[in-house]
Image: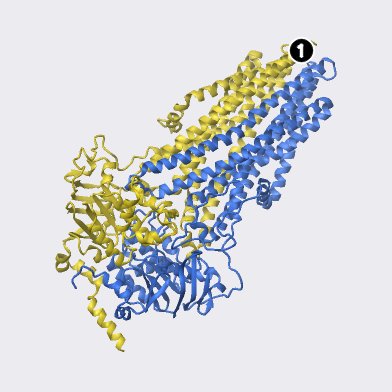
Chain colours: A yellow, B blue
């Protein structure tokens, strides 16, 4: 199967910034090779012109020359070393950063498809494979072929006939190498995939450890791990066996060559066509020609694994982001959205996940259909509905976390797709359903969206979110460290921090996605009151479960299976919408008075 | 030797490290690299027999490897030199056979060794994994997932690089050396003597370099761990990062770690890669001296040319394994650095059951807290003097402001942490006399943070009880009101959940979590804000179903939505680690205390 572009070609640009040290390294290598090649010749001279000719001086002088050459070799080797290490590590660093940047730029749609475990493998193991190729190319990978070439030339000069005899052997050896590389590449690809899987299982076990303990599933998970462990091992063994078979095979070729040389060389000498010294030198050249092949096994292993990794990285690096900025995307000022309060309008919006790849999507199902709604500037729009009705999806469309499938969303009449993503999101603050906090201090987390905020502002935001009190009770107050994923806070505390985080950015669109689900009703009410009194005017989109949350919304939308079934104020809906009445009844029952009655009744019994 | 990245112990409300004197969760430091090496060796023990075979193969091929050059020397001296063609063919054939056997046995040895090395590593991974599984929760509370993962993957990989190739080379190298040395001495005493001199020189260099490489690799592995941690957190929190436009600062943090990895890599590799060229040059020196010396001797007629030629070849054959041995010594540093980090984990105390245990085949679900006290960090008690009695089959609701200690109480019941004072009994037995596995098996937990696995929906449900049939799983799903939406998914119950379960809403994920717990048929069901993201109508349906389901069993419900708990047998109002009010929903309302206050606040602003 021919490929238009070799996978490794994509990575040449990473080498470009370091072309100077790379070139220098190669120059050192060249000199090194020339020096290497001279040794057999000098040995030949010692033998033929020194020993045979009984010339002691020649022996001494040549010996000294060889010593000098060795010293020079060492110098070159060290320089080449330092340079190639530097280039290799630099390329690796740049590559890692590119992969990371790419991961960051992926839209949520892309991310939903890729597992963290797999992404991590790409960032660490796959980039390391490419680094190895760079390293090797600047060292053994170039040295060995050059040595081979040089020796070949010298061999031919020494005895063309012998060289000709060996030509098929050399070709055979090269053939063997190419065969191995071609066979190994798919094997490496497979191994990396198994490694992905292993990593994913590991990751889940570490992240989900509480659950696994709670359900006493350690054994089960152990089996799951064992399965992918065994699978991975099996493939590793396979590829290792393959790789390790190569070196002996090549050495066999070399050795066979030696035998051939001795035999036919001997024949030549018996005809006085060659000297012993020449034979010895020749065998040395042979060794020098074909021994690098043993080194090249290392190269071919790295090469094959590098190609496999290159393919995987390419797939990632060329993945088109689902949400992109148009070339003429507008900034806030250009769109006239710099200060004005914002109206959000959904016009015949429909959405479904792109089922193009992966197969793990909800696929062709429409999540949202025929959505027409308006959130007036400065007002609150609440969205209620059954689990899975599409509420979160709806609000996720506003910051363009996902792209609408059809229809459009307007901010003050401008299609959000015409705005720069960054500009759009600077308007919006989201408090998502699942609270995500980062390791750092409490203050750092609240400051997350507005890094330049000062202490007073942070505390004001925390107070509005009803978080200030509990924060002050923490051992180091605002400087208390939050562990990864906020493990050391309760659900409600985390949510309040997330709200503070959002408020600090003084957003003009505030999206609250069920953000008080873990907060008790009393605190929630206080938060709502505080929200009403915020100093900056904002348009609010609230997704909620509790009627108490939406009682005072300017407009309530009821979502059912992705469609709007009702719209209105609380009073209007209470009268005219059966679903709303149902929701209301399920929460607040028949009213407080009845409950009190019951209570009194029980007391009297 | 630097320690694993430590987090400051920020003593906070809910989940934290317990105050055990045995330093649970702190990483013990490995003593020295030789120690680590010795601890790795047992992993090869099960393969003793095969290793013996490998050893035998190595001996065989080393022998053949020595015969080859010897034959060549003979060939040159007896046939080529004097120019005799006959007999040349025969010796050539012998050489061919020798070489065939030589390389053939090399393949055998490598073949066998590949299997051994990978399987030994497989076992190491297995051990590491099962040990990690048994570590107490507090260990995980303070460690970043990414850093831990780095140990499980990168560090083992470092060992892999060394072990898979180096063991045979090591064996072969040592054998070759001895063999060649012996052969050289047989050939010519003085030349051989000069050969030995090179050994201490090379090893001197090696040890000098190795000291730096060891430090360098340890540093590198650590930095890699740090980079891993940052990346993992960034990927996991990507949504928030993007939403708040914080890509730049996350990138900056990444760059910082990336740069450190770069520096560590340069340092480690500069030293480690220095060795081969260095020893190569030393090798050249050696050959030169050999040639010069040999030439000088030959001129004096003390040795024949054939001997010199052979010696030169032996010399090169001698240098090769010597250089390789030096390189192995060096590359093992990376392996040992990784091994040390792995043994740090293996040396951490695991969660164990202490003392006499009572088997509990059947649990009714009678729970009793007797003056229980607990603090994650001393000085900050989370549970104070808590006493409560729960009869089997009752439903207990816990309410209170966030951070009051509700989840903590449930954590203590599952013995995720040990209490500081008082005792907890289950069916009259002290919790500490029950094996943790038995205890947790009878408790069904729906935690606050829903965690699902990257498997099919059905398998995720079956997680609750592994031997459940498909029908039982679906029955449980029906109870939890999840069956309907599951069937709407593209592959229904066989649909694969992506890690972030991006194709399910939060509420749907919670329903799955409830299904899972129901399937477990627990004696005690703990619902910790289990329906917080579920809409109230669905919730009401689940409530009814659960009530029927849990008629005989005990259940604890932590919730903020008071509509959930009206049917509870007892409502406990928790504040600051204490029970401040206790009673039925209606009784408490009548008391017009804290509960009443909480309850009525949800009506605020609403005209009754």
In front of the other: A537 or B137: A537
Q: Quadrant of the N terminus of chain A?
A: top left
For residue A330, what is the image quadrant? top left
In front of the other: A28 or A155: A28
- Give coordinates of residue A468: x percent, y percent: 35, 59
Say few, some or many: other residues with alpha carbon within 10 Å of mark 1 (under 14 / 14 to 19 / 20 or more): many
Above or below for B75 versus B268: above
Tell which subunit mark 1 falls on: A
Above or below for A520 versus A536: below
Can residue B133 be seen in the rendering of this structure?
yes
- Give coordinates of residue B36: x percent, y percent: 65, 48
Residue B34 as seen in the image, left or right of residue A337: right
Residue A312 as seen in the image, left or right of residue B200: left
Q: Residue furthest bottom?
A: A605
For residue B200, what is the image quadrant? top right
The residue at which mark 1 appears reads as A50
- Give coordinates of residue A357: x percent, y percent: 35, 46
Above or below for A462 versus B556: above
Label 1 element class? helix
Can residue A270 be seen in the rendering of this structure?
no
Q: Residue at the spot x=63%, y=33% of the render? A: A249
């Amino acid at each position: 199967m021919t490929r238009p572009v070799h996978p490794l070609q994509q990575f040449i640009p990473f080498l470009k910034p370091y072309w100077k040290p790379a070139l220098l390294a190669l120059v050192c290598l060249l000199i090194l090779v020339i020096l290497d090649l001279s040794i057999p010749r000098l040995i030949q001279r010692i033998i033929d012109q020194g020993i045979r000719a009984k010339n002691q001086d020649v022996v001494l002088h040549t010996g000294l020359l060889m010593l000098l050459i060795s010293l020079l070799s060492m110098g070159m080797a060290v320089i080449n070393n330092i340079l190639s290490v530097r280039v290799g590590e630099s390329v690796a660093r740049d590559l890692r950063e590119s992969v990371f940047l790419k991961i960051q730029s992926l839209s949520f749609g892309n991310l939903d498809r890729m597992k963290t475990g797999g992404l991590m493998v790409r960032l660490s193991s796959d980039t390391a494979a490419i680094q190895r190729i760079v390293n090797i190319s600047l060292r053994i990978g170039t040295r060995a072929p050059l040595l081979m070439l040089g020796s070949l030339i010298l061999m031919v000069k020494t005895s063309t006939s012998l060289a000709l005899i060996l030509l098929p052997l050399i070709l055979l050896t090269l053939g063997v190498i190419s065969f191995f590389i071609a066979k190994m590449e798919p094997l490496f690809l497979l191994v990396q995939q198994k490694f992905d899987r292993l990593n994913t299982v590991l990751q889940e076990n570490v992240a989900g450890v509480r659950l696994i303990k709670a359900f006493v599933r350690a054994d089960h998970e152990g089996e799951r791990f064992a399965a992918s462990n065994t699978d991975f091992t099996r493939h590793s063994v396979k590829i290792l066996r393959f790789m390790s078979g190569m070196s002996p095979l090549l050495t066999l070729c070399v050795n066979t060559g030696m035998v051939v040389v001795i035999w036919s060389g001997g024949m030549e000498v018996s005809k006085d066509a060659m000297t012993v010294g020449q034979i010895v030198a020749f065998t040395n050249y042979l060794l020098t020609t074909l021994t690098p092949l043993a080194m090249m096994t290392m190269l071919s292993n790295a090469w094959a694994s590098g190609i496999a990794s290159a393919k995987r990285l390419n797939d990632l690096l060329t993945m088109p982001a689902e949400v992109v900025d148009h070339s003429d995307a507008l900034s806030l000022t250009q769109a006239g959205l710099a200060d004005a309060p914002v109206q959000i309008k959904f016009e015949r919006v429909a959405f479904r996940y792109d089922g193009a790849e992966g197969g793990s999507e909800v696929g062709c199902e429409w999540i949202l259909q025929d959505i027409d709604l308006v959130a007036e500037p400065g007002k609150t729009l609440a969205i209620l509905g059954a689990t899975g009705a599409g509420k979160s999806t709806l609000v996720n469309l506003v910051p363009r976390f996902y792209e609408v499938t059809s229809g459009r969303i307007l901010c003050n009449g401008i299609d959000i797709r015409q705005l720069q993503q960054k500009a759009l999101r600077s308007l919006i603050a989201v408090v998502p359903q699942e609270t995500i906090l980062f390791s750092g201090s409490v203050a750092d987390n609240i400051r997350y969206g507005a890094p330049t905020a000062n202490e007073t502002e942070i505390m004001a935001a925390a107070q509005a979110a009803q978080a200030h009190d509990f924060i002050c009770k923490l051992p180091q107050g605002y400087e208390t460290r939050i562990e990864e994923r906020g493990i050391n806070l309760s659900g409600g505390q985390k949510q309040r921090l997330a709200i503070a985080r959002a408020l600090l950015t003084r957003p003009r669109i505030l999206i609250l996605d069920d953000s008080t689900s873990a907060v008790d009703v009393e605190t929630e009410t206080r938060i709502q009151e505080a929200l009403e009194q915020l100093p900056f005017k904002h348009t609010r989109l609230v997704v909620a479960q509790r009627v108490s949350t939406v009682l005072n919304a300017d407009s309530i939308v009821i979502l059912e299976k992705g469609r709007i079934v009702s719209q209105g104020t609380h009073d209007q809906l209470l009268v005219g919408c059966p679903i709303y009445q149902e929701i209301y009844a399920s929460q607040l029952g028949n009213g407080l008075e009845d409950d009190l009655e019951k209570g009194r009744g029980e007391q009297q019994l | 030797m630097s320690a694993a990245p430590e987090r400051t112990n920020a003593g906070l409300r809910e989940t934290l490290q317990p105050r055990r004197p045995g330093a649970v969760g702190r990483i013990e430091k490995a003593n020295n690299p030789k120690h680590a090496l010795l601890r790795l060796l047992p992993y090869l023990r099960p393969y003793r027999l095969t290793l013996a075979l490998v050893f035998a193969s190595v001996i065989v091929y080393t022998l053949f490897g020595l015969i080859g050059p010897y034959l060549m020397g003979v060939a040159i001296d007896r046939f080529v030199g004097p120019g005799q063609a006959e007999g040349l063919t025969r010796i050539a054939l012998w050489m061919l056979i020798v070489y065939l056997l030589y390389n053939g046995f090399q393949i055998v040895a490598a073949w066998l060794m590949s299997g051994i090395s990978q399987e030994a590593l497989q076992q190491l991974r297995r051990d590491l994994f099962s040990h990690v599984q048994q570590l107490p929760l507090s260990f995980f509370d303070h460690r970043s997932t990414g850093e831990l993962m780095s140990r499980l993957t990168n560090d083992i990989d470092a060992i892999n690089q060394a072990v898979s190739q180096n063991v045979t080379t090591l064996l072969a190298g040592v054998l070759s050396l001895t063999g060649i040395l012996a052969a050289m001495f047989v050939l010519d005493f003085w030349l051989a003597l000069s050969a030995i001199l090179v050994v201490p020189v090379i090893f001197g260099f090696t040890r000098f370099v190795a000291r730096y490489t060891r430090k360098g690799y340890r540093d590198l592995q650590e930095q890699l761990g740090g980079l891993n941690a940052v990346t993992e957190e960034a990927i996991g929190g990507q949504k928030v990062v993007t939403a708040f436009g914080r890509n730049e600062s996350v990138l900056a943090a990444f760059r910082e770690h990336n740069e450190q990895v770069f520096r560590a890599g340069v340092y480690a590799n500069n030293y480690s890669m220095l060795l081969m060229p260095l020893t190569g040059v030393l090798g050249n020196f050696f050959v030169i001296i050999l040639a010069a010396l040999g030439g000088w001797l030959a001129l004096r007629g003390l040795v024949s040319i054939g001997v010199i030629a052979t010696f030169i070849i032996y010399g090169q054959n001698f240098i090769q394994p010597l250089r390789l041995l030096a390189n192995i010594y060096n590359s093992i540093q990376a392996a040992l650095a990784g091994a040390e980090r792995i043994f740090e984990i293996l040396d951490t105390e695991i969660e164990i059951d202490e003392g006499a245990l009572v088997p509990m085949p059947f649990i009714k679900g009678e729970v009793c807290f007797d003056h229980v006290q607990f603090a994650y960090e001393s000085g900050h008690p989370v549970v104070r003097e808590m006493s409560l009695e729960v009869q089997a089959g009752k439903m207990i609701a816990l309410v209170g402001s966030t951070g009051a200690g509700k989840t903590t109480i449930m954590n203590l019941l599952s013995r995720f942490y040990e209490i500081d004072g008082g005792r907890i009994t289950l069916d009259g037995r002290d919790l500490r006399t029950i094996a943790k596995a038995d205890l947790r098996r009878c408790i069904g937990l729906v935690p606050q943070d829903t965690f699902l696995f990257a498997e099919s929906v059905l398998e995720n449900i079956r997680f609750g009880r592994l031997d459940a049939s498909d029908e039982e799983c679906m029955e449980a799903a029906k109870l939890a009101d999840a069956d309907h939406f599951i069937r709407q998914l593209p592959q229904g119950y066989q649909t694969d959940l992506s890690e972030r379960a991006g194709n399910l809403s939060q509420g749907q994920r919670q329903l799955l979590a409830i299904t899972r717990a129901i399937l477990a048929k627990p004696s005690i069901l703990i619902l910790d804000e289990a329906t917080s993201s579920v809409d109230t109508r669905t919730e009401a349906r689940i409530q009814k179903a659960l009530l029927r389901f849990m008629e005989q069993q005990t259940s604890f419900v932590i919730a903020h939505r008071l509509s959930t708990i009206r049917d509870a047998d007892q409502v406990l109002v928790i504040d600051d680690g204490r029970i401040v009010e206790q009673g039925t929903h209606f009784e408490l309302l009548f008391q017009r205390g804290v509960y009443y206050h909480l309850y009525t606040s949800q009506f605020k602003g609403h005209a009754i």
